């Protein structure tokens, strides 16, 4: 199956590019996910990387005309995020992926956010081998579907397009985890938003300490387990690598 791999993006400055988006691009450059194109669908970023690193094209440009295996598809204005449940910038970028998939003749859309990483061969093999359905992972910490990693196969493209057409103003008013019409939540894979999981702080466990810089240090955050299949909302301070031999 022909697949595209994409993340959504909003690049504030060069540091954000290097620490988040370049990191994502380097990680997936030569694997572990099989995809004919790696795409960042951009919400009108104020900073764009040099074209020798990755080409940027307008969202109106026919992507099939570009042979590059990696590209930024950029909307010319920023819609951003207004609240926890109102984030039209992300919705616009995410929903545009099905348009690109149709244009490129792809059979599968693989969505892995710019702070999400596949860590194990078994999950990579699962993603690469899926041929039907709309799949997401599971966050045990929050007890809800993890939509930072999704696989949408061509049998779901029409449903994807119908979902997109229902809300042209992008005002969904709820979290994507509660709205997207995925067909499978894959709880057999281990992973989470480990940067948001706090270690037991003993006498300092009260939330009133959360705003103190000391208690935001990595020492007080959960470590990524050695047997994790994926991590989402990864921080630059978190160290991990793809396990080639499981």
Image (tube, rainbow, N blue to C red):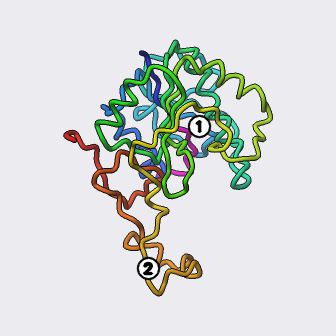
Q: Is residue 245 left or right of residue 183?
A: left
Q: Is residue 241 left or right of residue 56?
A: left
Q: Residue 235 at what x, y percent from top left?
A: 43, 57
Label 2 SS: loop
Does residue 4 sit above or below 149 in this rendering?
above
Q: Nearer the viewer, residue 100 or 122?
A: 122
Residue at x-position 61% and y-position 34%: 94
How far is mark 1 from mark 2, CA to CA?
A: 38 Å
Q: Nearer the viewer, residue 47 or 19?
A: 19
Label 2 neighbour load within 10 Å: few <14, some 14-19, many 20+: few
Which segment did they paint magenta? 6-14
Label annotation for residue 201: 2
Does residue 128 sit above or below 177 in this rendering?
above
Point out the tag, 1 or 2, that comes first from the N-terminus. Answer: 1
Q: Nearer the viewer, residue 146 or 80?
A: 146
Q: Is residue 13 magenta?
A: yes
Residue at x-position 67% and y-position 47%: 175
Pick the quarter of the image with the N terminus: top left
**Where is mark 1, residue-wise?**
42
Q: Is residue 204 magenta?
A: no
Residue at x-position 71% and y-position 42%: 88
Label 1 SS: strand
Q: Residue 71 at what x, y percent from top left?
A: 48, 29
């Amino acid at each position: 199956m022909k697949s595209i791999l994409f993340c959504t993006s909003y690049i504030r400055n060069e540091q954000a590019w290097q620490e988040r988006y370049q990191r994502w691009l380097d990680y997936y450059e030569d694997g572990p996910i099989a995809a004919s194109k790696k795409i960042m669908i951009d919400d009108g970023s104020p900073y764009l990387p040099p074209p020798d690193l990755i080409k940027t094209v307008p969202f109106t440009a026919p992507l099939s005309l570009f042979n590059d295996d990696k590209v930024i598809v950029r909307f010319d204005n920023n819609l951003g995020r207004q609240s926890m449940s109102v984030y039209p910038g992300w919705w616009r970028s995410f929903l545009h992926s099905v348009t690109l998939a149709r244009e490129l003749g792809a059979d599968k859309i693989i969505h892995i956010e710019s702070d999400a990483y596949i860590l194990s061969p078994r999950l990579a093999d699962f993603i690469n081998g899926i041929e039907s359905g709309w799949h997401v992972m599971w966050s045990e910490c929050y007890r809800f579907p993890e939509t930072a990693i999704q696989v949408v196969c061509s049998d779901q493209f029409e449903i994807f397009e119908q979902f997109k057409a229902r809300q042209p103003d992008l005002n969904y008013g709820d979290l994507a985890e509660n709205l997207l019409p995925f067909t499978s939540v894959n709880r057999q894979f281990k992973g989470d938003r480990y940067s948001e999981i706090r270690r037991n702080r003993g006498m300092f466990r009260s939330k009133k300490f959360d705003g103190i810089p000391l208690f935001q240090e990595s020492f007080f955050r959960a470590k990524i387990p050695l047997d994790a299949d994926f991590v989402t909302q990864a921080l630059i301070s978190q160290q991990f690598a793809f396990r080639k031999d499981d």
